[in-house]
Image: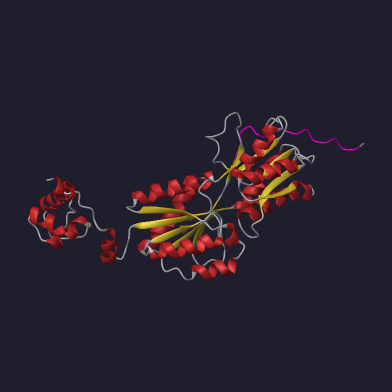
């Protein structure tokens, strides 16, 4: 008996016990149409369950030319924005009958390139792709890589306007504009900006929004207030250290991970938010993890981003017509991390 339990069941074993042909068992267990009564189908499934039979996915893939697997390549799994997005996409894929493989590139273009090749060789049905910043800086090289792909792919968050594929992202320039405009409206004029210099990606767009707001208010953009980071905590910490050596009264920090590093440096200096320093962050992925700080932030609704990315993917998989680009509007969520600054007196 123990030996029978350890022995791997076959389709023929199930067919013999259920009283149907092996071909019928294969059709039933792979959810394919067949002229078998519902009672017989239930009997086949029950026998398969009793024998712990597992469908051979490799064989199923060969027969159906689909794996029911999708993949998500993202730059940094430790980034709370990307990990939350991965969870949302996975939930939506599961509801559609797909499994999701999540792979991290560590923000390196060489890893992006290898993952694209590996996932294609594994036979995934489609790929959600959030580019590494290294690839963002090598547009022509990346577009060449995309042309080699043979399955549907959707670019998310970090996109190229001239990429010949479906893309979904937020209006990053508008997000940067909303953040800086709010600080200006609260009377701040000496505003730092911690940004990612990715040449043509979300970081550059958020910086452009910051610059647009300052110019709209007649405030000169000063290099001493601009601090480059890499979307990771340590760079936010170093940026805070540098900005505290200036007379800046506030900072727009272009993503939540850098904000965490920025906050750590402020706490070390025993500076209170917003009494001593005002901050506007970006992403809104930290609110459930911070205590004592209510961050005013530019919100990118992760659920909406996941919805649109999955809608585009499932339309592509079904062969339905679909637009090439979706740009979502960001929102400013005002909480308690910005203090109104008294405007400077005019001379005379």
**Residue 233, position in %: x, y?**
61, 44
Which residue is at the front of the view, 284 or 209?
Answer: 284
**Residue 326, position in %: x, y?**
51, 57
Q: What residue appears at the point 27 percent right and 64 percent down from the top-left corner? A: 64
Locate residue 146 relative to residue 319 in the image: left or right: right
Locate residue 234 relative to residue 40 in the image: left or right: right
Q: What residue appears at the point 41 percent right and 58 percent down from the top-left corner? A: 313
11 w.r.t. 92: above or below: below
Locate residue 341 relative to residue 170 in the image: left or right: right
Which residue is at the front of the view, 162 or 102?
Answer: 102
Q: Which residues are magenta?
A: 333-347
**Residue 294, position in %: x, y?**
60, 32
70 w.r.t. 348: above or below: below
Locate residue 200 relative to residue 322 in the image: left or right: right
Look at the image and say whether residue 147 sits in the magenta stretch.
no
Quarter holding the C terminus is: top right
How many numbered circles does the render carry?
Answer: 0
User: Is the stretch drawn in magenta largely helix, strand or loop?
Assistant: loop
Q: What residue appears at the point 34 percent right and 52 percent down from the top-left corner? A: 96
Which residue is at the front of the view, 300 or 254?
Answer: 254
Residue 11 appears anywhere in the view: yes
**Residue 40, position in %: x, y?**
11, 52
Extreme right residue here?
348
Extreme left residue here?
19
Q: Quadrant of residue 37?
A: bottom left
Residue 322 appears anywhere in the view: no
Look at the image and say whether residue 346 sits in the magenta stretch.
yes
Which colour assignment does the render follow? secondary structure
């Amino acid at each position: 008996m123990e030996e029978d339990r350890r022995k791997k069941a076959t389709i023929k074993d199930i067919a013999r016990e259920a009283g149907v042909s092996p071909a019928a068992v294969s059709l039933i267990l792979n959810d394919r149409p067949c002229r078998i009564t519902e009672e017989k189908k239930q009997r086949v499934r029950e026998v398969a369950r009793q024998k712990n039979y597992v469908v051979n996915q490799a064989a199923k893939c060969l027969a159906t030319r689909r794996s029911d697997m999708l993949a998500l390549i993202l730059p940094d799994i430790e980034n709370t924005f990307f990990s939350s997005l991965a969870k949302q996409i996975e939930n939506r894929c599961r509801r559609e009958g797909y499994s999701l493989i999540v792979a991290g590139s560590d923000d390196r273009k060489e890893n992006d390139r290898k993952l694209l090749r590996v996932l294609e060789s594994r036979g995934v049905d489609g790929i959600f792709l959030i580019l590494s910043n290294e690839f963002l800086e090598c547009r022509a090289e990346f577009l060449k890589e995309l042309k080699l792909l043979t399955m549907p792919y959707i670019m998310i968050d970090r996109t190229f306007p001239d990429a010949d594929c479906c893309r979904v992202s937020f209006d990053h320039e508008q997000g940067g504009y909303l953040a800086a405009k709010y600080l200006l409206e609260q009377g701040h004029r000496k505003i730092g900006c911690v940004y990612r210099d990715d040449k043509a990606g979300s970081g550059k767009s958020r910086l452009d929004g910051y610059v647009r707001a300052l110019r709209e208010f007649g405030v000169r953009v000063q290099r001493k207030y601009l601090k480059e980071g890499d979307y990771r905590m340590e760079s936010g910490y170093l940026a805070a250290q540098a900005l505290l050596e200036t007379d800046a009264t506030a900072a727009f920090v272009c993503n939540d991970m850098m904000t965490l590093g920025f906050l750590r440096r402020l706490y070390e200096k025993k500076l209170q938010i917003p009494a001593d320093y005002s901050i506007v962050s970006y992403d809104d992925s930290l609110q459930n993890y911070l205590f004592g700080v209510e961050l005013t932030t530019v919100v990118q609704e992760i659920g909406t981003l996941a919805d649109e990315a999955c809608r585009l993917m499932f339309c592509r998989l079904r062969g339905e017509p679909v637009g090439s680009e979706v740009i979502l509007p960001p929102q400013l969520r005002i909480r308690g991390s910005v203090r109104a600054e008294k405007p400077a007196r005019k001379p005379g």
